[in-house]
Image (tube, rainbow, N blue to C red):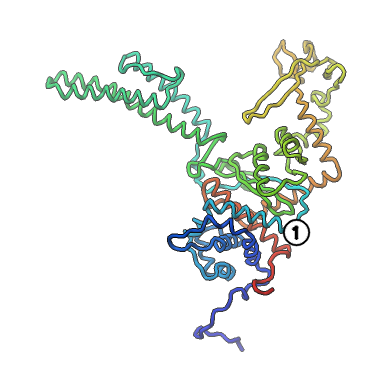
Amino acid sequence: MYKEYTMNQLVLPLDLEVRLQENDIAFAVHDLVEQIPDEAFEPFWRTTGCPAYHPRMMMKIVLCAYTQSAFSGRKIEGLLKDSLRMMWLAQGHEPSYRTINRFRVHPAVAPILKAAFVAFRCHLVETGEIDEEAIFIDGTKIEANANRYTFVWRRAVERYSAALVEKSNQLYDELMADQVIPEIERESPDALSVQELEQVAARLEEKIEAIDEEIASTTDVAERKRLRAERKVPRRLHKQAADFAARKRRYEGHMATFGTRNSYSKTDRDATFMRMKEDYMKNGQLKPGYNVQIATEGQYTLAYDVYPNPTDMKTLIPFLDEIETFFDLPAHIVADAGYGSQQNYTDILERRGRLPLIPHTMYRKERKKKWREDPFNIANWAYDDETDTFTCPDGRRLPFSHESHRTDRNGFTRDFRVYECESCDGCPFRELCTKAEPGRHRQVSVNGAWEEQKHMTRTLLSDEKTGALYARRKTDVEPVFGYLKANLGFTRFSVRGKQRVKRELGFALMAVNLRKFIANGIGGSAKKGSG
């Protein structure tokens, strides 16, 4: 006996909603997007042309597709034809992959995504999923949608640019020595600018045209032969000058694209070449990518951003500024030692009035026995507060010498007190203690503000409450990256350009949030129309 089955009977279409399970992720997507205020969708409104698909519907289908690990526009289009949840969210509409791709990279999607994250966080607070005591920050690198071999390196451009300056100066000196063209007015005697090289090329072209006119005006064979021979030199020099001008303009364009970076990809100029972790042995290679920063609590992503620089330390301050556009910062900022610097501590303590639970870069090393027992480590030297002097292992005094100030390329200034040994002559430990040249003595630079901040950090991390809060970092923020890459399969961006990449990242991270929300059994509200 079989259940009734026939392909020749007309079946009335049913509401797809009744075919979905009660806790289907489509309901969570629907509820989230419906919470976004209408004002966020106003930029998509238009009064002329063909009516557009409703942006709420487009948000739902793109977000739901990302929860199903479908990141391609064509795959999303395919899901609209064979996925019940996608058909229900689209309510019979079937936008093409071009329409889907245009929507998800549209600049107006950014505020909609931000509103979605804000609404999601508010719901987490209301349900008690997060306690707003701290946020946990970490970063990872994700490969860009760019050719891995179309790279440009700052060091190579600088080397080629310096060689070009030398060659162009030689060319100009040759022109002046032979009096081929009249002297031009230069902005700097060190290097010719692009405009000056183009001016040299124009003068040489005038010289060539003048010779051409002479050749055309004479009928003497010998004279014409002499003029042709004379024309070879300015032609060669004109070609060089035009080539130098084009190359210099190209190098200046490269330097402008670099900004503060050391490399970029020709395919996606916002992407920087970074070392990716390919496997557990960390046998990675340099690939174009972005440094993704997220802030989490309860393993839910609450804020995010992307940066072109591979190191985390310089991203913390701009990322905290970005977080404050999502919500107010909690009392504790938790991150790993990759973010520990004086500039970051100062910003969190003085500018934001929060506590950084961030170990400094040498925190783990300072706790080792080898560090604590190293006799040549300044931290282990005796210090006399009254005389303001250190005493080295050989018993020699290092009194205060002078103050020093160092400003890095980001404009942050560090203040040091410099102590210098009275004399290192004849010291049996000189080779082990200092690398100073003979006749010079050991100097020690002490950054008082930095030492106070490190002491504060050690105290906070040793405290039972704040130490336990810091210990939550590994189990809070790092699993999100594992879920994003391993479970969701999001290991490479499918769009190009920093802003577009950021918008796609928003869809992927919200997809992770919704999948976890459903897995915890607190998502998937009652079905539409069921009360």
**330 vs 7: above or below:** above
**305 vs 366: above or below:** below
The residue closer to the viewer here, 32 or 149, is 32
x and y, in percent, of residue 240 in the image = 35, 26
User: Would residue 69 be seen by someone viewing this image from the given angle?
Assistant: no
The quadrant of the picture occupied by the C terminus is bottom right
Residue appearing at x 36%, y 18% in the figure? 184
Left or right: residue 231 versus residue 16 is left
**123 vs 239: above or below:** below
x and y, in percent, of residue 170 in the image = 40, 19
Left or right: residue 169 versus residue 216 is right
Residue sticking out furthest to the bottom: 1
**104 vs 274: above or below:** below
Amino acid found under the numbered disc labelled 1: Glu
Q: Disc 1 marks which residue? A: 126
Residue appearing at x 18%, y 23% in the figure? 215
- The crowding category of the residue bearing disc 1, from other C-alpha atoms within 10 Å (few below 14, some 14 to 19, many at least 20), is few
The quadrant of the picture occupied by the N terminus is bottom right
Residue appearing at x 55%, y 45% in the figure? 498
x and y, in percent, of residue 238 in the image = 32, 25
Left or right: residue 175 versus residue 164 is left
x and y, in percent, of residue 275 in the image = 60, 41
